[in-house]
Image: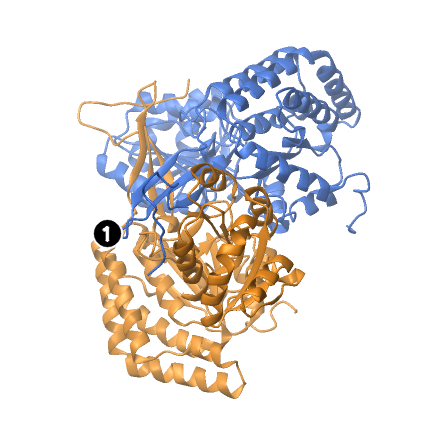
Chain colours: A orange, B blue
């Protein structure tokens, strides 16, 4: 794709400069003002219901005309109930504690110099995402709460919805005395523009992609700005021979069935050989009854078929795959070592669980599995900002730096070192390095 | 440059796989074992003095023959004293607290589910650096302490020194029962190899460049792995009209002269107009006496010349420049607003200082300047891992994510969420998401 082929109407540099300028204002905006702006956004979303749903209906119409799969059409659809949920989510962000300004690692050096680290906004956050228009408002709200300006670039299927949501948000910002450029929606379908956004390092501090593996890869390949990558969850659950059978049934079912389309849903069940005969018939029957397609290794298949549970042989591609659907791969393993090795080879560093009554096995699993979240006797579905008590999240990171797991409010901040202290009456202290 | 042109002897994939494997071992290695390995490395460096200095002499000879500037030759030179300093630095790392295993944010969710974040190693760290061979050992030691495996790629001028240092380190690791692949030195001059290393995301978790702006840019442009970029310090010091004159002289002199070749040395002095007549003659005379070349704006130049202090007019390129030498640019400003605006436009987000007796000015400066470290009545030279009480550092970050300022031990770690708890006798608890 040639540079400049499709971005004639968008001045990305100007957007970046405006975002940077807005971020300076937001960085010193008091919490109460940010919270009032969030409530104003919430009100504005409710008041603009007709306008927002009309823009969304146009997106949905076009998606249907272009034969988008019904499940994808559903993802971009806004209804009065979904819009109300979105508005109340924004309201709730206003009630969460503001991490900006927190001091930590306070101390006095041997020479008397006081130092601390102070939590501050990241600055300008660019979010690049697909499908769901609610991401536009979610990310804008969480970034506003943490004093960050945002540049939001959603999927081309929701350009009209996103543009309208952006206008509503910006109007509310202005009404609250904050710069409307604090939230800028890039409602332009050009991909070359995304490529340029990923290199706008003078103005953008971090890029957060939300979407499939291809989007994350595109961002990592093209960005010169730091990217918080993640979202791909190839999640395993290992049941050892000591686990409680009935409770294991409940957790496996929860991890796979409660919401199969999300990244923390279970993909592969690993069962210790000594447990397989006991566990698989009942777990398999539960899952099959909930419409789950089971893809098992030879041993697992034999046990399932002997119990009359429908299952098909797993192919190589069924391990290390994020299904995002009612499909579960299943393998019988010798024990913990083989389970750990399988997870090391096939996991994506997202959410991994063990069910066991053996404290030593639990400790080894927690120590040795390298993932954002490691669960003991708990469903993989708990790797989620809301569930973990963080209030909300903009994404789930599977990379190692900055944040791992939910990108919630604190993860949308950085810190500055403050070295020295404001002058106090009568104590004039100056510090040189010896 | 065509792919594969110069890496025929290096199997980078195999190095990556070996590093990943070693990192799994290191992640669960107890602190005492890591510390003993560090002491073994220190002893081995002392024992191998002859071999190390011989390899270094060959590097130095070649550098001299190829007419490398004497200052650069000095940077790559190892002497018995420098090697001893290196060995005792490694010994000192063994005495620092190990951040791995720390728990934080411990809590119990409303449903009874216990959660915490546990500090763990990053995994595999690739360091790409220039000139100084001591970086090879420094980075290896700090990464070993934090349970990270390393791939180290130094400058081509020090390939022999680095290879020999690497052998010595690896021998000591093996003698301590740790995998020698925990530290791998890439002693191959090919740049294409670096490009491939920057994309080895299957095996490498983070890239830390140390060197000039060109190296950092090369890494950001070519990496698909997260990069901790930084090191470029365009540092300002603003003296307002309330500052104590004598102490200001001492701090300005310290910030500029103590070690001008480092990133936290002062580059630009901003002086409030009402202070300029009082401050500049004495400060300028101090600096000129220490061999500092002063490059001043019109107003500053007039004051300096009137006081008989040598100075030349500043050009546009003298603001926003990291001098790394005895050169200081100087500008007279109206007051705090103009100083803040200058720093916003020209700073690199590294170290910025204010000298003032006005608490309100100090507070605004700390709040509004966006930099890794903001100093009040203290020299910019304090933005340093050792000075800030962190023990040591592998680099100084000027980006926003993960770490800001010194990359010390804690900054070489990440965390994992631990959800649920090891089974306790008599309390079988399992958690599904509601």
Task: Specify the quadrant that holds the N terminus of chain A.
Answer: bottom right
Q: Counting other residues with Cα less than 10 Å from the Cα at mark 1, is it few (<14), some (14-19), or many (20 or more)?
A: some
Residue, far left? A425
> Which quadrant of the view contains residue A396?
bottom left
Compare residues A244 and A17 and report the one nearer the observer: A244
Relative to B59, is A75 on the left or the right?
left
Q: What residue did someone put label 1 on? A: A30
Residue A203: % across, % down: 46, 55
Say which quarter of the image contains residue B74: top right
Percent x, y of residue A386: 33, 57
Answer whether residue B250 is visible to the viewer in this image.
Answer: yes
Q: Can residue A204 be seen in this snapshot?
A: no
Q: Chain under label 1? A: A
Please identify the quadrant where the C terminus of chain A is shown.
top left
Spot occupied by residue A34 in the image (x, y as percentages of width and height)? 25, 57
The answer to whether residue B404 is above or below residue A125 is above
Q: Is residue B221 left or right of residue B263?
A: right
Q: In percent of the image, x 63 and y 15: which residue is there?
A: B83
User: Which one is nearer the viewer's eye here, A160 or B22?
Assistant: B22
What residue sits 40% from the left and 60% below the top? A150
Q: Is residue A185 above or below residue A266?
A: below
Q: Is residue B335 above or below residue A23?
A: above
Q: Secondary structure at mark 1?
A: loop
The mark tally for this picture is 1
> Residue B129 versus residue B382: which sits nearer the camera?
B129
Q: Residue A112 location, x and y as percent?
A: 30, 20
């Amino acid at each position: 794709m040639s540079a400049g082929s499709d971005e004639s109407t968008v001045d990305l540099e100007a957007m970046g400069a405006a975002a940077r300028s807005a971020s300076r204002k937001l960085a010193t905006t008091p919490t109460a003002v940010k919270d009032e702006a969030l409530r104003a956004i919430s009100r504005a979303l409710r008041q603009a219901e007709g306008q927002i749903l009309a823009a969304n209906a146009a997106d949905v119409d076009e998606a249907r005309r272009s034969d988008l799969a019904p499940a994808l059409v559903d993802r971009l659809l806004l209804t009065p109930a979904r819009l109300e949920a979105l508005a109340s989510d924004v309201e709730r962000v206003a009630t969460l504690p503001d991490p900006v300004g927190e001091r930590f690692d306070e101390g006095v050096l041997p020479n008397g110099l006081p130092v601390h680290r102070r939590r501050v906004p990241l600055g300008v956050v660019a979010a690049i995402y697909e499908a769901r228009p609610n991401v536009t408002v979610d990310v804008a709200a969480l970034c506003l709460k943490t004093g960050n300006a945002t540049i939001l670039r959603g999927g081309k299927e929701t350009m009209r919805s996103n543009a309208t949501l952006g206008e509503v948000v910006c109007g509310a910002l202005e009404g609250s005395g904050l710069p409307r450029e604090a939230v800028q929606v890039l409602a332009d379908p050009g991909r070359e523009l995304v490529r340029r956004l990923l290199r706008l390092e003078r103005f953008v501090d971090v890029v957060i992609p939300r979407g499939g593996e291809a989007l994350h890869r595109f961002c990592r390949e093209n960005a010169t700005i730091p990217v918080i990558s993640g979202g791909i969850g190839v999640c395993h659950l290992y049941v050892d021979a000591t686990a409680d059978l009935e409770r294991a049934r409940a957790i496996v079912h929860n991890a796979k069935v409660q919401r199969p389309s999300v990244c923390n849903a279970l993909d592969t069940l690993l069962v210790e050989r000594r447990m397989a005969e006991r566990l698989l018939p009942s777990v398999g029957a539960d899952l099959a009854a909930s419409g789950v397609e089971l893809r098992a290794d030879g041993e697992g298949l034999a046990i399932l078929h002997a119990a009359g549970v429908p299952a098909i042989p797993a192919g190589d591609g069924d391990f290390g795959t994020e299904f995002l659907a009612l499909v579960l791969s299943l393998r019988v393993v010798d024990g913990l070592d083989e389970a750990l090795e399988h997870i090391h080879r096939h996991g994506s560093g997202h959410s991994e669980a063990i069910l066991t009554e053996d404290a030593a096995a639990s400790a080894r699993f927690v120590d040795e599995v390298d993932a954002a979240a490691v669960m003991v006797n708990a469903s993989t579905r708990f790797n989620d900002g809301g569930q973990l008590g963080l209030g909300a999240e903009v994404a789930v990171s599977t990379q190692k730096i900055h944040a791992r797991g939910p990108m919630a409010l604190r993860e949308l901040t950085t810190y500055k070192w403050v070295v020295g202290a404001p002058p106090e009456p009568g104590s004039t202290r100056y510090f040189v390095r010896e």
